[in-house]
Image (tube, helix red, strand yellow):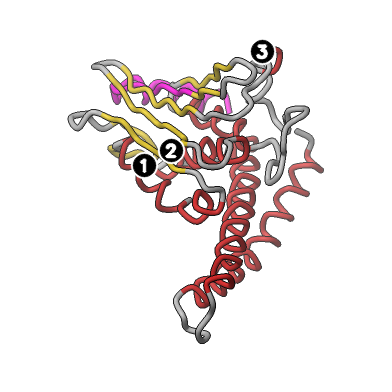
């Protein structure tokens, strides 16, 4: 990514951040009844505005994180993270978006999964981007299915949607910067979310990939080491090559 393009992304992100926050705060005031009584139809419109503002806010966050990532300025705050708890947090965060799209999010995970050593905020961004990507393509009244499994070495999170799927020729390209598929809706998509997911997994010594057949939906999976030492080695390598 060229320096001028980075500068434009950074400038746009900072300029958009404040008005997006104001929009969400105003919607919350309507939703809480602080501005007087509103009808059910009006609340539905407020919900749509809230969902779209949340989408824009995620895009702004992606812009800023991409700039930091490319410049090698990302600072990770490592801690013990439970991936199922991350999924629950994302479900709460994206509840207006899921409701507006008439979608449900399900989670299957063993109760005794150990925590992984990771930056919790960054992994919430990964799961948020994967769910938001599924929302764009999943048909109404369908489910986005998330599962977390693990062993002594790795934990894997898999997300399955029931949308149109991804052509086989595109599976190697979807994690590239500014990639957008052809023939599918790109509403709210700037082609950065999946690239950012891969960058975060790379920093943690993990990996991310997609599987799909046209018309059969898409399955996104990522793995992260459970062993703190493996993650520490990956972080040291990422820092040395930044």
- Residue drawn 34% across the image and 19% down it: 230
> Which residue position holds label 1?
86
Residues drawn in magenta: 221-242
Horizontal and vertical percent for residue 173?
68, 20
Q: Tell me: residue 190, above or below residue 37.
A: above
Identify the residue position indicated by label 2 in the image.
123
Magenta stretch, main secondary structure class: helix
In the picture as drawn, the residue positioned furthest to the left comes out as 112
For residue 167, the mark is none
Structural crowding at the residue carrying mark 1, measured as other residues with C-alpha within 10 Å and reported as few (<14), some (14–19) or many (≥20): some
Contact (Cβ within 8 Å) of mark 3 with mark 1: no
Disc number lying in front (3 or 1): 3
* Residue at image coords 63%, 48%: 59
Q: Which residue is mark 3?
A: 168
Among the two numbered marks 2 and 3 on one chain, the one whose residue lies closer to the N terminus = 2
- The CA span between labels 2 and 3 is 27 Å
Q: Position of residue 225 (x, y in %)?
A: 35, 21
Quadrant position of residue 241: top right
| Rendered residue at 43%/38% (across/down) | 123
Residue 76 in the figure: left or right of residue 189: left
Q: Are marks 2 and 1 in contact (CB under 8 Å)?
A: yes
């Amino acid at each position: 990514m060229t320096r001028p393009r980075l500068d434009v992304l950074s400038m746009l992100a900072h300029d958009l951040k404040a008005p997006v926050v104001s929009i969400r705060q105003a919607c919350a005031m309507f939703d809480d009844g602080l501005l007087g009584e509103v009808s059910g139809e009006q609340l539905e419109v407020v919900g749509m505005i809230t969902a779209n503002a949340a989408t824009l806010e995620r895009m702004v966050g992606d812009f800023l994180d991409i700039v930091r990532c490319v410049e090698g300025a990302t600072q990770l705050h490592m801690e013990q993270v439970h991936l199922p708890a991350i999924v629950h947090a994302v479900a709460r965060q994206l509840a207006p978006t899921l409701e507006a799209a008439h979608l449900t999010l399900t989670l299957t995970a063993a109760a005794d999964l150990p925590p992984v050593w990771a930056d919790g905020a960054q992994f919430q961004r990964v799961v948020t981007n994967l769910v938001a990507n599924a929302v764009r393509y999943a048909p109404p009244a369908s489910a986005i299915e998330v599962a977390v499994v693990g062993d002594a070495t790795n934990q894997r999170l898999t997300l399955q949607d029931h949308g149109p799927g991804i052509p086989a020729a595109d599976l190697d390209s979807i994690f590239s910067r500014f990639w957008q598929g052809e023939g599918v809706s790109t509403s709210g998509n700037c082609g950065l979310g999946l690239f950012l997911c891969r960058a975060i997994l790379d920093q943690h010594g993990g990996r991310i990939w997609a599987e799909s057949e046209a018309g059969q939906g898409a399955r996104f999976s990522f793995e992260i080491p459970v062993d703190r030492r493996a993650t520490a080695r990956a972080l040291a390598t990422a820092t040395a090559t930044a």
